[in-house]
Image: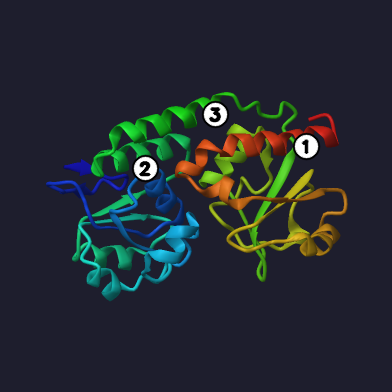
Amino acid sequence: MLIDQLGNTINIEKEPMRIVSLVPSQTELLYDLGLGEQVVGITKFCIHPEEWFRSKTRIGGTKDVDISKVADLNPDLIIGNKEENTKSDISALMEIAPVYVSDIYNLTDSLEMIAQVGRICQVENTAQDLIHRIKNSFEQLKPLRSQPKVAYLIWKDPYMGVGSNTFIDVVLTQHLGMVNVLGNQERYPSLDLDQLPETDFVFLSTEPYPFKQKHFQTVQEHFPHAKIMLVDGEYFSWYGSRLAHAPKYFESLLNQLRALGTY
């Protein structure tokens, strides 16, 4: 028996042998935990690892799970997330098999999730090794001292950004040493770029909207004094095993910022 991050009791009497994952970052985690044979279903957004994306059965998207296709896979464990998946889908899936639901807001939550998934899938030692590597990597990360201001954009038409009470906000403020100019707004607000406060940097994320260099000019018109930068959204928002590599990416990003000014 295990309690997930929503407080639900997960009753699994034996090692799960047919797992369906509803979340890209947690799918990658299952791969890195060595559960290749056990995972039978993933979403169409679970692009890592590529070999699973090509070979595993896809059960729809994170917000529109094909419930009947999941049932056909006869899973004995389904792994989801409160933010990524809908409450109605999770409720329907609970009629098929035990569902573990994560709820991630910070690094501590991420490490707890990894430990719980490791325990429920009976790969605890591998999970603990991964947790140790992630902790060590983040402990070596040196945040900026001058706390420059940043606006982090995740969508356009309409523009949307990252506010408080999000994993990305914690990465920006606690681990990178920046001030989130949208920190006075909750979650992922829609934005009028002309109404935003002045900022030192605008981060355009590569996901969920695939911002590219071609979008820089339009955004720059709204922030004439800010530095526009493209950032890897997977490192900022994937809270599974990718966290072991995220600090190396963040350190490279911070060095770019330091080279631009007294940061």
Q: Nearer the viewer, mark 1 or mark 3?
A: 3
Q: Is residue 140 above or below residue 184?
A: above
Residue 117 position within the rendered picture, expressed as x and y whole percent measured from the top left: 31, 43
Residue type marked 1:
Leu
Q: Which label's residue is closer to the chain start, 1 or 2?
A: 2
Residue shown at 68% from the left, 36% from the top: 178
Horizontal side, residue 115 vs residue 177: left or right:
left
**Residue 257: numbered disc:** 1
**What kind of element bears circle 1?**
helix
Residue type marked 2:
Leu
Residue type marked 3:
Ser
Residue 158 position within the rendered picture, expressed as x and y whole percent measured from the top left: 65, 69
From the image, which quarter does the N terminus lie in? Answer: top left
Residue that mark 3 sits on: 137
Q: Is residue 46 visible?
A: yes
Horizontal side, residue 204 vs residue 25: left or right:
right
Residue that mark 2 sits on: 33
Q: Could you tell me how far apart the alpha carbons at marks 1 and 2 are, in whole angstroms?
A: 34 Å
**What kind of element bears circle 2?**
loop
Residue shown at 47% from the left, 45% from the top: 239
Horizontal side, residue 155 vs residue 1: left or right:
right
Q: Nearer the viewer, mark 1 or mark 2?
A: 2
Q: Is residue 37 above or below residue 130?
A: below
Q: Is residue 62 visible?
A: no
Residue 63 position within the rendered picture, expressed as x and y whole percent measured from the top left: 42, 67
Residue 101 position within the rendered picture, expressed as x and y whole percent measured from the top left: 32, 52
Assess disc 3: are there few (<14), some (14-19) or many (≥20) residues with their C-alpha within 10 Å of its C-alpha. Answer: some
